[in-house]
Image (spheres, rainbow, N blue to C red):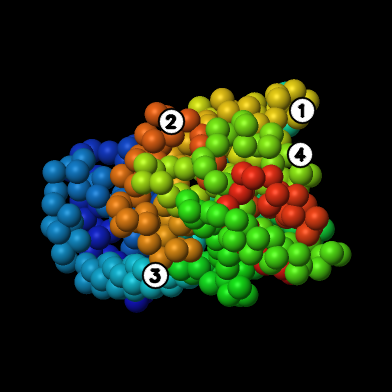
Amino acid sequence: MDKQEKKTVDIGQKILEIRKAESLSQTEFAEKFHVTRQTVSNWEHGKNYPDMETLMRISDEYGITFDELIKKDKALIRSIDRSRRVARKSVIAFTIIGIIMAGALLIKLMPGLVSKFYYDPTEVAATAVDSDGEVWETTRLELDARVYSELFLPQFKYEFAGSSPLGYGKYDFNLEESIRIEPAMAHEVSGRIERNNIQIYDPAEFRPMDIGFVRDVETDGDLIEEMLAELESLDDKDRYIACITLNEDMDYEAACKWIDQYGTGFPWALIVTQDDGYAESMGMYTDYIGVRAAFDAKKYPYLLRCREPFMKDPYEDPPYKEEYAKKHFISMLRYEADNPEFMKMVDGTTAGIEGEPIKEWTNNKIQYIERNGLKVYGFAVDATKEMLLNIAKSGKVCCIETQENS
């Protein structure tokens, strides 16, 4: 018997004993375990081993424990131990490879995963389909910038936004306006949003005007003459941004028709939102056309315009119709209350002038408007010296403050 036979004779002898005890031929034994007769012969002559699965089946079939079946075959035991060690090393190797691959995948996904916890300007905030079947999508930044700029920045109205994700809650962005008080000037704002913080690269941009609205209830001839003198000192060829304060609040439609006769373009109306005789710096454009964009029209009717969404004829509704303008203004207030993140980034707070929480502050404004309708405190306009002089002489104005259109 050669060395190989000596190594394997124990298990082979055991199989031979089992087969003879069961009075089975090699062929019959082979059929039981789905192997060939030659394979059984090789086992019994110690030329090779049955595989582990077959050994287990033999053990089960004849009521012999696995340990009893192999315990005298030291070579087989060493082989099994060796196989276990190889298997264990393989498991460790595959585990390490799996950890490395999982780490690489996590590194790849981490920038996006971290961004999920912060303000995402690229998020699709609304989708709509127009009458021609065209699908419109609006991002969170587009809606936020449009609503915020119209409410709080009389000289700007940003209509378009683009942003590029950089990972880990960082985004580069730019804002572009389609309508401005200074219509001859193209204008863009760029910056970066990083983990709920905003940086405008030009600090002079995206902030309220340096001028404001002042109502002096004791307006007399001297004050009017002083205002006219200041306007006379303006350059005849230039255009100016002007804050025009009315002597007294006017109904929205009447105020829009009154200012329209002076040809100032698309004015911004300062809307009265409280009972104390003053107006916070909050208003809306009297341009009722607006842009075609998607938004939740059911929750925020007329959010981006004072007309029906996706109307084929943009002039089908009469301009300055208070029914639509009121819904537009209230929708903007409600949108800000529901989506305060952008306001907080820009202003550093989501509280109103009086320090009230945004929900309470906004609801107070909405309740006032629902009780009293839209009342106009004044207008922000883009105008020439001649236009402003004509407005000042109307008898309806107590103050006009100007700054150069630059």
Q: Which residue is drawn at 58% across and 34% down?
A: 252
Q: Which of marks 2 and 3 is nearer the N terminus?
A: 3
Crowding near the residue tagged with mark 1, few <14, some 14–19, many ≥20 C-alpha atoms within 10 Å = few
Q: How far apart are marks 4 and 3 (CA)?
A: 73 Å
Q: Name the residue under label 1.
A: 315
Q: Earlier in the sequence, mark 1 or mark 2?
A: 1
Q: Earlier in the sequence, mark 1 or mark 4?
A: 4
Nearest to viewer (mark 1 / mark 2): 2
Q: Earlier in the sequence, mark 2 or mark 4?
A: 4
Does residue 47 lie above or below 260 as drawn?
Answer: below
Q: What element carries label 3?
A: helix
Q: Which of marks 4 and 3 is nearer the N terminus?
A: 3
Q: Mark 3 points at which residue?
A: 99
Where residue 283 appears, as percent x and y from the top left, is 54, 46
Nearest to viewer (mark 1 / mark 4): 4
Where residue 214 appears, as percent x and y from the top left, is 52, 57
